[in-house]
Amino acid sequence: MPLSALIVDDEPLAREGLRLLLARDPDVAEVWEAAGGREAVARLRSHRPDLLFLDVQMPEMDGFAVLREIGAEAAPVVVFVTAHDRYALQAFEISAADYLLKPVTEERFATALARAKARLRAEPPGEAARQILGLLEALAAPQRSLKRVAVRGAGRTVFVDLAEVGWMQAAENYVELHAGRAVHLLHVSMARLEAALDPAAFLRIHRSLIVNTGRIRELLPGAHGDFVVVLDDGTRLPCGRRYADRLRALASNPF
């Protein structure tokens, strides 16, 4: 079945690039463009495209406002085009919506288009709309930091309060949580855990180390303009040079 698509972006070169990529796909028969949110709403209502390539960041009316205006139930399958930060990308992934990160590469576009066509064929009516609603709700909700984590192992689940964790260390596909004499092994990447932590309470000081700032007793000078972090239990942790500025900022009094 021939497909139609609408490209929404306030940058003419970005629209042209997506149009050229869409033109290579034999399944796409019609392509329309909109240079802004208001025009996008009008074209969505009049043309009802199968696919929507939607820029997130536009003046006056951004991509999310476009979806709110038309209502998620009337939205086609959406591929977001964005230069958003990692938190927004996580929200896209949580809601199962696809996205293209600018600048758009040919390979990544082909993957996103294939996924969009598969969703169009496989999902029942309204499912894409429900996922979009989930995305908007995730972005609208305040960022919540983890207070505790569930650690599974040896046939049981242990709940660990993060306030009791003095420091964390990467261990291949896991992270070690050091809470007093106890060490808990959490199956998560360092980057994903860091993104979920309260930045006011935890600080990454090394590519493989995160420290509870409330447990820092003192900072000792390192050999290369960096620091050695000393915790309240006497544990000494090295600070990577690229992270030293974070500790300098932490050591600056607000007066």
Image (spheres, rainbow, N blue to C red):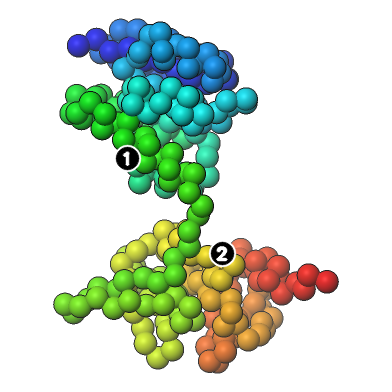
Percent x, y for residue 198? 52, 65
- 35 or 111: which is nearer to us? 35
The answer to whether residue 174 is left or right of residue 192 is: left
Q: Is residue 110 above or below residue 238?
A: above
Viewer can see residue 114: no
Mark 1: amino acid: Ala
Q: Secondary structure at mark 2?
A: loop
- 255 or 74: which is nearer to us? 74
Percent x, y for residue 224? 67, 73
Mark seen at residue 199: 2
The answer to whether residue 225 is left or right of residue 13 is: right
Crowding at mark 2 (Cα within 10 Å: few <14, some 14-19, many 20+) = few
Percent x, y for residue 17? 47, 18
Residue found at x 19% / y 24%: 121
Q: Secondary structure at mark 1?
A: loop
Crowding at mark 1 (Cα within 10 Å: few <14, some 14-19, many 20+) = some
Q: CA distance from mark 1 to mark 2?
A: 26 Å
Q: Is residue 178 above or below residue 103?
A: below
Mark seen at residue 187: none
Residue found at x 40% / y 40%: 135
Percent x, y for residue 185? 32, 75
Tell me which label, 1 or 2, sits earlier in the chain. Answer: 1
Q: Is residue 52 above or below residue 234?
A: above
Mark seen at residue 96: 1
Q: Would you identify the image quadrant in which residue 75 lies?
A: top left
